[in-house]
Amino acid sequence: MKPVTSWLPLVLVLLATAGCHGKPIRVQAGGRITADMPATQVYGPVAPMVVGGPACETDLPRVAVIDVDGVLLNMDMTGFYSMGENPVGLFRERLDAAAADPRVRAVVLRINSPGGGVTACDIMWRDLNAFKARTGLPVVACLMDVGAGGAYYLATAADQLLAHPTSITGGIGVILNLYNLQDAMAQFNVLGLPVKSGDNIDLGTPITAQQEASRAILQTMADEFHERFKTLVNNARPEIDTRQKDLYDGRVFTASQALERGLIDAIGYVDDAVRVAREMAGTPCAQVVFYHR
């Protein structure tokens, strides 16, 4: 995981977005064509959608499938080219909806994410553990295209962890992406003139070269978060051989490699994850429900 996150391991992404709430936005192209673009604000709670078993029978037990998609950041992703809702808030809302339904007997997390911010992923991991503690429901995680970095961090809270045959997982590392733009700025006669109080208030600034003392501070932070990530994985999966040097260096693995190293329990598809959840809950005929707006 990363003090900030990168694409496969954890990467912190800062987005400047224009807010658009409520009314649609009118866009004019070439002064002639106009079109109304709907606002990105989402209204209404999540609602269950039954996709397995006879929907007419309302008293059947259920397996709730909860999706976790995209970069996991604790921020509202609204505006032009929006990526959707706050993934942390949406995840908790879906967990609360499953907890409030007495027919739900198990949960399947369908994860397709390269990771995200350290704190966002840790909050989601904690929320999932709190959900399990208060409901006693079994949770099965199924990794899709990618479940690496902070997404794998979250998946370790599940009781069983499956991955598709072509999934990419692992990424047990932390990264803070920094840049030195001093020379690039000089080509345009741009000179940074920061006014600051506190020698380290501009840690990681891109307008000057990074000093060794500043780098050491940031490296200590990255190492601390990395140790937390490793400890969490070791506690969740005690069968892992911690002497494997390549396990914690941030690299990613295929599903077969991850199974060999003990990072997952089995290779399978979403249908297999649902079957495992039904078996753990003792409800072989449970309906499958998703939660959507």
Image (cartoon, grey):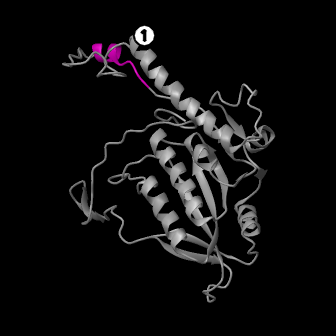
Is 55 positioned to the left or the right of 80 in the image? right
User: Which residue of the protein is positioned furthest toward the left in this rendering?
Assistant: 195
Whole-percent x, y for residue 107 in the image? 63, 64
Whole-percent x, y for residue 201 in the image? 29, 22
Q: Residue at x 25, y 61 (%)?
A: 25
Q: Quadrant of the C terminus?
A: bottom left
Which stretch is magenta? 178-186
Q: Secondary structure at mark 1?
A: helix
User: Which residue of the protein is positioned furthest toward the right in this rendering?
Assistant: 260
- Specify few, some or many for label 1: CA neighbours under 10 Å numbering under 14, 14-19, or 20 or more: few
Any magenta on residue 185?
A: yes
Is 161 positioned to the left or the right of 67 in the image? right
Residue 92 visible from this viewpoint: yes
Q: Quadrant of the N terminus?
A: top right
Q: Residue at x 71, y 37 (%)?
A: 253
Q: Which residue is mark 1?
A: 212
User: Which residue of the protein is positioned furthest toward the top in this rendering?
Assistant: 212
Which of the 4 quarters of the picture holds residue 196? top left
Q: Amino acid at mark 1?
A: Glu
